[in-house]
């Protein structure tokens, strides 16, 4: 079975990868300087010219880009090619401020689809597979990215998009889908629906490629066991192309970054200083092959760790850990950093589903934290005493994990709105 989509790239020597990065970075900086006045101005303000960038070792001299820059430059301010050379836009699903719009030439689309194809092959995909793409299509990058990658691998592609669970299950059973691509929260919902309809024996899935939202190792094990598959993580941002910036291999110990297209750095989110390998900090990406939307040193706000430890799969590209939260939508409650993934870990360890909502408020100038948690049909009880006891146990477990008190409210199964796209986990009512 094919192990790599592009073996000569995915298993290239570190020297070769660095040579590609040096050459492409120098070329990209020149391209941006000549074609993107917005970024050129930022470089001039920092006193940097393309002549100062001789390779990756000089990357730290360049200014950062943030989501605020993307909003300020909307829609065409960061465009690196003529509009007549662009063939597509994709856009973030964000709800605050102006949407982020990313542009693609045909070459950009081809390279993005290559990255997604690498992820599918790493999950065991071949041209014998039936790949059901249940990410949203349209402006969201999930559907189009995995769709294109699936075509390149030669899978029979089911472009399902998200939602309409009855139809998802009908095609999954009738056409024998072997790979499912969707958000982890939707995978958990599909697993629930399959068990409710007793369809386990009719499902042929062997692998799932899940991304677009944070999920814990506990949630992975839960999905793997319920769907009898291996669950692979995939990572990407609309700003840098979409899913496929990095992906997991069979080792499942982090995601290989496609370093022939993206240079990764880890910085201190407060100072912007580049941190040594192995330290936890904010992930920054420089896209070195993108033509239409060539972002340099883009701050993702995702907190993670990079590792160059050799991988048993044979891939030589650096690995990033699963994001451990974000430097921006991380909740600060009573001065304590709270990540939804911490709460999810506690719930799954205590036998609850990963369907919950975190409600933060401020009462009498003091923060309050409430976690609404669905009970499973097995532990559902309508006796008040039993529910109160279960809530107390969860309060204690959350206090141990977070270091602060969180009120817990247990609710009946299926009463928290299901998400078929990205799960809305946090409701912050504070007027900050």
Image: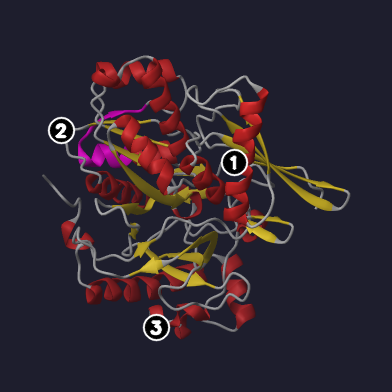
Residue sitting nearer the eye, 272 or 397: 397
Q: Could you tell me which residue is drawn at 62 percent across and 34 percent down?
A: 389
- Residue 8 is left or right of residue 82, and the answer is left
Judged from this view, the residue extending furthest toward the left is 1
Residue holding disc 2:
128
Task: Give the image location of residue 322, x and y in percent.
Answer: 43, 55
Magenta-drawn stretch contains 150? yes
The image's mark for residue 393 is 1
Binning the other alpha carbons within 10 Å of mark 2 as few (below 14), some (14 to 19) or many (20 upward) gives: few
- Residue 306 is left or right of residue 32, and the answer is left
Q: Is residue 204 above or below residue 31?
A: above
Residue holding disc 3:
54
Q: Could you tell me which residue is drawn at 40 percent across and 30 percent down?
A: 134
Q: Mark 1 vs mark 2: give the one in front.
A: 1
Task: Give the image location of residue 135, x and y in percent.
Answer: 43, 34
Task: Give the image location of residue 43, x and y in percent.
Answer: 58, 76
Q: CA distance from mark 1 to mark 3?
A: 58 Å
Q: CA distance from mark 1 to mark 2?
A: 48 Å
Binning the other alpha carbons within 10 Å of mark 1 as few (below 14), some (14 to 19) or many (20 upward) gives: some
Q: Could you tell me which residue is drawn at 63 percent across and 53 percent down?
A: 329
- First-in-chain label (1 vs 2): 2
Q: Mark 3 vs mark 2: give the one in front.
A: 2
- C-beta proximity under 8 Å, tags 3 and 2: no
Residue sitting nearer the eye, 297 or 167: 167
- Residue 408 is left or right of residue 381, and the answer is right
Residue sitting nearer the eye, 307 or 46: 307
- Residue 384 is left or right of residue 147, and the answer is right
Q: Which segment did they paint magenta? A: 147-159
Is residue 183 among the parts visible in the rendering? no
């Amino acid at each position: 079975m094919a192990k790599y989509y592009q073996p000569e790239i995915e298993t290239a020597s570190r020297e070769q990868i660095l040579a590609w990065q040096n050459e492409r970075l120098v070329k990209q900086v020149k391209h941006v300087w000549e074609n993107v006045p917005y970024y050129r101005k930022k470089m001039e303000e920092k006193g940097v010219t393309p002549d100062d960038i001789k390779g990756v070792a000089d990357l730290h001299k360049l200014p950062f880009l943030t989501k605020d820059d993307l909003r300020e430059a909307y829609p065409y301010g960061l465009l690196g090619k003529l509009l007549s050379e662009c063939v597509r836009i994709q856009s973030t699903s964000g709800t605050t401020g102006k949407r982020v719009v990313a542009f693609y030439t045909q070459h950009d689309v081809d390279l993005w689809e290559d990255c997604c194809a690498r992820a599918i092959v790493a999950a065991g995909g071949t041209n014998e597979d039936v790949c059901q793409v249940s990410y949203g299509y349209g402006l969201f990058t999930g559907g189009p990215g995995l769709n294109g990658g699936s075509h390149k691998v030669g899978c029979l592609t089911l472009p399902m998009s998200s939602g309409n669970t009855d139809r998802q299950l009908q095609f999954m059973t009738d056409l024998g889908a072997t790979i499912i691509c969707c958000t982890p929260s939707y995978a958990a919902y599909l697993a629930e629906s399959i068990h409710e309809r007793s369809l386990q024996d009719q499902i042929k899935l062997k692998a799932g490629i899940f991304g677009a939202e944070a999920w814990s190792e506990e949630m992975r094990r839960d999905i793997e066991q319920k769907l009898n598959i291996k669950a692979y993580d995939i990572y990407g941002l609309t700003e840098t192309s979409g899913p496929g910036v990095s992906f997991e291999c069979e080792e499942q110990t982090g995601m290989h970054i496609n370093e022939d297209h993206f240079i990764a750095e880890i910085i201190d989110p407060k100072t912007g200083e580049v941190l040594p390998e192995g330290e936890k900090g904010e992930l920054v990406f420089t896209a070195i092959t993108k033509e239409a939307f060539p972002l340099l040193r883009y701050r993702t706000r995702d907190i993670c760790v990079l590792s160059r430890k050799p991988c048993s799969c044979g891939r030589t590209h650096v690995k990033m850990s699963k994001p451990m939260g974000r430097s921006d939508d991380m909740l600060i409650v009573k001065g304590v950093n709270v990540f939804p993934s911490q709460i999810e870990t506690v719930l799954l360890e205590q036998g609850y589903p990963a369907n919950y909502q975190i409600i933060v408020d401020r009462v009498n100038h003091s923060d309050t934290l409430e976690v609404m948690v669905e009970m499973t049909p097995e532990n559902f009880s309508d006796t008040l005493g039993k529910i109160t006891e279960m809530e107390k146990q969860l309060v204690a477990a959350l206090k141990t994990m977070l270091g602060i008190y969180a009120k817990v409210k247990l609710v009946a199964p299926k009463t928290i709105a299901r998400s078929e796209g990205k799960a809305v986990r946090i409701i912050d009512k504070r007027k900050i």
